[in-house]
Image: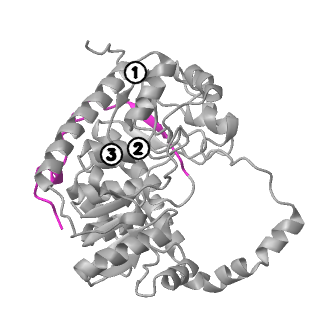
């Protein structure tokens, strides 16, 4: 399905403006997460459109925490869950789909095994921190992770950020001084949520831009190229409601059941493994979980869905890009400074889609609720241009020593 609207046409990029320069991209490089992989793909493609030789810096800071002892590792390996996982492993090709995407679609530096090797093994004209929640204090993986994700290893004056997320609406005092010191050497700073920008501005005493997530800088035509390379086996042939949950599975499936009464479509949740598929069937017997979904399959599944029910930021983004009727449930309904809802709120408020948020306790849909395509495309076109212009100015500042216009 190719969108012929303005949002479907490739965005306008300065052709080769920074040809001959190089950029190193710092973001999460491990794990199997659709949003993380797709934002890496988009960030690299956007920088290449500017003419940069852009590579992802292939380093993953170690996760804090002591490694279990031998006795504990043996017990874990012999646990019923581990044995069942191994028994079903011949049917689990999800990892292969992610490897296929990462090896075929992304360009990376040679693997870097330790933080101290970064200075020796990377030499770029500029360094870009972003996107994803690399500045979330709960996810920065201790001091070594902070040093990496805040580009402490890179030369001052050659660093910018594009759309990283703090994930929280308030910066704790214990983290504020650390951030202020690290970001002093950045030539340009942007994030992807308003609350994060306001929090950073209060700490840094300088302006912080709000920009679109890099996945929204690519058109649906460009995403179609990736989706068309998806394995066909995971894609259902009947009309379906796609369910993608990061932590609220029963509530997501309950909402899909209510929508099913209206549309009659099949409920199709994304399963993380064969065991997860069995769990989903137990929670919702009428569902038909889809297995072996990599990043390309994820885009294809959203593109072809009748509607989408999710608690995912990028599940929401791709629903907007493809004009899929969707409902988003907040992953964390506690609110307050510890909440991770800021990025979702900014996204939905930007497109006037706050009514797409739902509380499972009182979710009673009257219909499928089609999106206003013209309004979304107008907003998306305007914000793409604004985000690309800001990124261009940031790159000029660190590559060409060009002062931004007042």
Q: Is residue 184 left or right of residue 227?
A: right
Residue receiving disc 1: 398
- Label 3: state its secondary structure: helix
Can residue 183 be seen at all in this image of the molecule?
Answer: yes
Residue drawn at the location 83% of the way across and 73% of the way down = 75
* Residue 381: percent from left, percent from top: 17, 42
Camera-near label (1 vs 2) is: 2
Residue drawn at the location 42% of the way across and 27% of the way down = 198
Residue contact between numbered discs 1 and 2, judged by CB atoms under 8 Å: no
Residue receiving disc 2: 343
Marks 2/3: CA–CA distance: 6 Å
- Label 3: how many residues lie within 10 Å, few (<14), some (14-19) or many (20+)? many
Can residue 125 be seen at all in this image of the molecule?
Answer: no
- Label 1: state its secondary structure: helix
| Tag shown at residue 347 | 3
> Of callouts 3 and 1, which one flags the residue occurring earlier in the amino acid sequence?
3
Residue drawn at the location 43% of the way across and 62% of the way down = 101
């Amino acid at each position: 399905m190719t969108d012929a609207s303005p949002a479907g046409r490739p965005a306008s990029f300065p052709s080769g403006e920074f040809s001959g320069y190089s950029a190193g991209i710092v973001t999460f490089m491990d794990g199997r997460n659709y949003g993380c992989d797709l934002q890496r793909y988009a960030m690299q493609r956007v920088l290449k459109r500017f003419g940069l030789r852009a590579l992802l810096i292939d380093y993953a800071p170690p996760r804090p925490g002591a490694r279990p002892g031998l006795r504990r590792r043996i017990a874990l390996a012999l646990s019923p869950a581990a044995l069942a996982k191994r028994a079903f492993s011949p049917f689990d090709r999800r990892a292969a789909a992610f490897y296929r995407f990462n090896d075929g679609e992304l360009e990376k530096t040679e693997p870097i095994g330790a933080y101290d090797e970064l200075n020796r093994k990377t030499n770029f004209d500029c360094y870009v921190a972003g996107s994803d929640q690399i500045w979330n204090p709960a996810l920065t993986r201790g001091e070594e992770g902070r040093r990496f994700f805040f580009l402490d290893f890179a030369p001052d004056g050659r660093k910018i950020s594009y759309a990283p997320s703090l994930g929280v609406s308030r910066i704790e005092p214990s983290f504020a001084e650390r951030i202020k010191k690290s970001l002093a050497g950045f030539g340009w700073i942007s994030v992807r949520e308003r609350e994060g920008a306001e929090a950073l501005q209060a700490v840094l005493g300088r302006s912080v831009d709000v920009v679109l997530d890099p996945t929204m800088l690519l058109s649906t035509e460009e995403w179609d190229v990736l989706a068309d390379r998806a394995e066909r086996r995971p894609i259902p042939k009947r009309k379906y409601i796609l369910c993608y949950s990061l932590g609220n599975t029963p509530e997501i499936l309950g909402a899909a059941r209510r929508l099913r009464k209206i549309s009659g479509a099949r409920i199709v949740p994304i399963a993380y493994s064969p065991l997860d598929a069995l769990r989903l069937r137990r929670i919702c017997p009428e569902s038909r979980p889809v297995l072996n979904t990599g990043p390309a399959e994820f885009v294809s599944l959203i593109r072809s869905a009748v509607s989408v029910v999710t608690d995912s930021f990028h599940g929401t983004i791709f629903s907007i890009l493809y004009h899929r009727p969707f409902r988003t449930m907040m992953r964390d309904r506690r609110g307050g400074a510890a909440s991770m809802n800021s990025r979702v709120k900014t996204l939905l408020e930007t497109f006037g889609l706050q009514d797409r948020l739902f509380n499972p306790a009182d979710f009673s849909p009257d219909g499928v609720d089609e999106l206003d395509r013209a309004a979304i495309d107008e907003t998306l076109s305007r914000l793409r241009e604004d985000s690309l212009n800001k990124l261009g100015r940031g790159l000029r500042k660190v590559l060409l020593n060009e002062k931004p216009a007042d």
